[in-house]
Amino acid sequence: MEDINEEKTHINKDNDDELSHRKTKEKSKSKRKWVIFSILLTVIVVVIGVWFLFIPHLHLLGNKKVTIRLGEKFEEAGYKATVGVKNITEKVVVQGQVNSQKVGKYFINYKVKYHNITIIKKRIVLVIDDIKPEISLQGASEIKLCPSKTYDDEGYTAFDNYDGDITNKVKVVAQEDKIIYKVSDSSGNEATVIRKVIREDQEKPIISLKGSKTVYLNIGANYNEPGFTATDNCVGDMTSKVTVIGSIDSSKSGNQELSYKVVDEKGNEAIVTRNVFVKYPSGYVPPTVYKDNMIYLTFDDGPSNVTPQILDILKQKNVKATFFVIGASSDLDYLIKREKEEGHTVALHSYTHRYDLVYSSFDNYFDDLNKISQKVANIIGEETKIIRFPGGGSNLVSKKYTLGIMSTLTNEVLMRGYHYFDWNIDCDDAGSAKNRDDVYYNVVNNLHHNQTNVVLMHDFQNNYKTLEALSDIIDYGKANGYTFAAIDMDTPLVRHRVFN
């Protein structure tokens, strides 16, 4: 038993020795690590100190890579150089320039030297062109083209802010409904312009009349067609396709029309008109032929505020009359239209009704006549050639402005195809007649069965005396065997003797 205990004691002792040895070894190892760490830390501190105290440092402010647009000024962001806590920025040398007018990559070098140690840094500056070129089209940007035709390009130009004229670099691609123009500059900026092509034909053919659009033909003479041509923007010559509508009857005086019509393949229609005035030869005066029992009521100087009531009476009595109109306010144009629609004759009197103007010269008279003629044609849709001179053909007031003008005008209007009418009964509502009775008796007392009775009346503003007498005048005429009618181009001329 003692031997066993002694053996256990010996074993325990060996274990203690081994444990002690191990602890000693671990302490030695730990000590070595600390020494190595201390050495490394010392080296690092020394290196940092040297780096901080003796090596220069260069810092670039802003971005190291800068991009500016062409023409934009390069602004230096700045820099800073230090050694330790010492500022040595003044020792920095900057080299390199930026040409902002030229696209490219530029380098700015920054160098600082201290204790024979040199530090260099670099900034990159890119000058770029990001502006697209401009393409300018000659001609319209939208064209209408006949379906069968090829577009003849009107041209184009291309200009770049950097490269200048680059027209020769434009690429053109023609498609059915558009033409595409593309160009790129040296920086890759691309521009595109499109010219729209509308393939359709909405254009009318053009008819050109040979000779004059207004022809004067003596009564009884043969009409010889001067001719015409027709062209179409797509088809070309279409003269053979023209249809002439109408014919000329030279036995009747007055204006007659010939219409020339042509239609192209797309249904576009063109019509032009030639006016043929069949007139009496110079110096010829048609005879006055009377018709028994006829009364032609004529009203000058309208329309006015009494015109609607005059028309109402005529409609009620189923009587047609003749209105020699003037250039009154356009607000009253509807009355001229009503006169035409209710079967009356709309004739021409004067546009201005100013004696000092219309009789001051030959040209002034026809200028005035043409104005009222055009106004009436626009309202009623047709031209009228029945006229009455302001003051009548026998007026003497014209002598005050132009000596002999009425002798000239009365002959000229006949040669131009007009029929002018004076009167042989004057109700005198613009003169001595004071009331409706005066108007009534001035008419009925001068009617005759063996003549064409052309009665002068007026529908000027507030002419109530004529308005009030009108119904009784019509009743008297019908009761005494007279027939009422409106003047037309077949009505015998009733004219006064010319005194100027």
Image (cartoon, grey):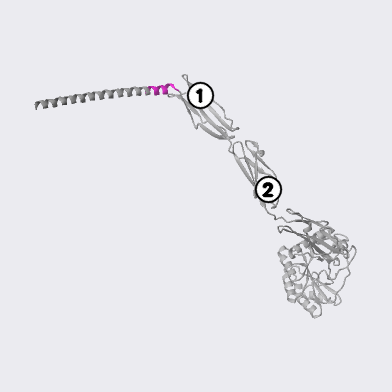
Residue furthest right in the image: 283
Identify the residue at image location x=78%, y=76%: 474
Q: Identify whether 294 is placed above or below 174.
A: below
Which is more toward the observer, 66 or 236? Answer: 236
Residue position for label 2: 140
Asked if residue 136 lies left or right of residue 107, the reply is right
Number of marks in the image?
2
Quarter of the image that includes the N terminus:
top left
Dot 1 corresponds to which residue? 111
Label 2 element class: loop
Q: Residues within 10 Å of mark 1 (few under 14, many from 20)?
A: some
Amino acid type of the residue that numbered disc 2 sits on in the rendered structure: Ala
Is residue 35 among what the camera can see? Answer: yes
Residue 166, x across and y down, in percent: 65, 38
Whether 204 is among the magenta residues is: no
Magenta-drawn segment: 45-55
Separation of residues labelled 1 and 2 (CA atoms) = 60 Å
- Looking at the picture, how far across and down is residue 113, in whole percent? 49, 21
